[in-house]
Amino acid sequence: THTHTHHILEDHKKEHLCDLGFREDFLGMTLFEFEPEKQLSCNRDYYVDNIAVDLAGRVAEEIFHTKGYTSGANSDLQKATNTARAIITEFGMIKDCGENMAFLGNYDFGDFSLLSDENKRQINEETKKLIDEAYQRAKTMLQENRPLLDSVAKALLANEVLDEKDLNRICKEYQEGK
């Protein structure tokens, strides 16, 4: 689902490998190619897209998993939350919080006691808004492109590992069949 959601997003990192294999600390993985030139000056939508990719596994559980949520998305949820907080407290990209909120990025968020109750409330409220926005974005993409998700899942079950060529081929076949 991370690969599927990520591939639909424009102007995003390219996936390098998708692995369904079970490992010690995770159920599978998607490795993305790091593009430093895109990391220097990114806009809010870029980061919200990253959050949507992080949340795709949890969204898939909601849509497709009949027994509810699992703990499998734990690190994805943490990463999404950290990115949302960075948008607010490090990059100053939320107008409602004021431009001065960016200075809070220097604080260790493990110690919220350094912040006023109003700042804590505002950060949590804006974090929730960003997470909800990205969640809906991921949910829409997964629902609208279900055949692509099914194709990637089928290929992963058959091969366990898909590289960039495999993923591009599957996505191209999907686009041509639309």
Image (cartoon, rainbow, N blue to C red):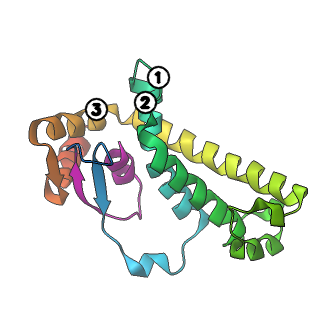
Quadrant location of the N terminus in the rendered image: top left
- What's the residue type where badge 1 is placed? Gly
- What's the residue type where badge 3 is placed? Pro
**Numbered disc in front, either 3 or 1:** 1
Q: Which residue is mark 3?
A: 147
Q: Is residue 44 above or below residue 39?
A: above
In percent of width and height, residue 86 lies at: 63, 66
Q: Which residue is mark 2?
A: 61
Q: Which residues are magenta?
A: 1-19
Residue 63 visible in image: yes
Q: Residues within 10 Å of mark 1 (few under 14, many from 20)?
A: few
Q: Which residue: 37% across, 65% down?
A: 13
In percent of width and height, residue 105 lies at: 69, 72
Q: Secondary structure at mark 1?
A: loop
Q: Residues within 10 Å of mark 2 (few under 14, many from 20)?
A: some
**Mark 3 and mark 1: span between their CA atoms?**
22 Å
Quadrant location of the C terminus in the rendered image: top left
- Reading the chain from its start, which is encountered first: label 3 or label 2? 2
Q: Which residue is mark 1?
A: 68
**Residue 11 highlighted magenta (yes or no):** yes
Q: Is residue 30 above or below residue 114?
A: above
In percent of width and height, residue 30 lies at: 30, 54
Q: Which residue: 79% across, 64% down?
A: 95
- What's the residue type where badge 2 is placed? Glu
Q: Secondary structure at mark 2?
A: helix
**Mark 2 and mark 1: span between their CA atoms?**
7 Å
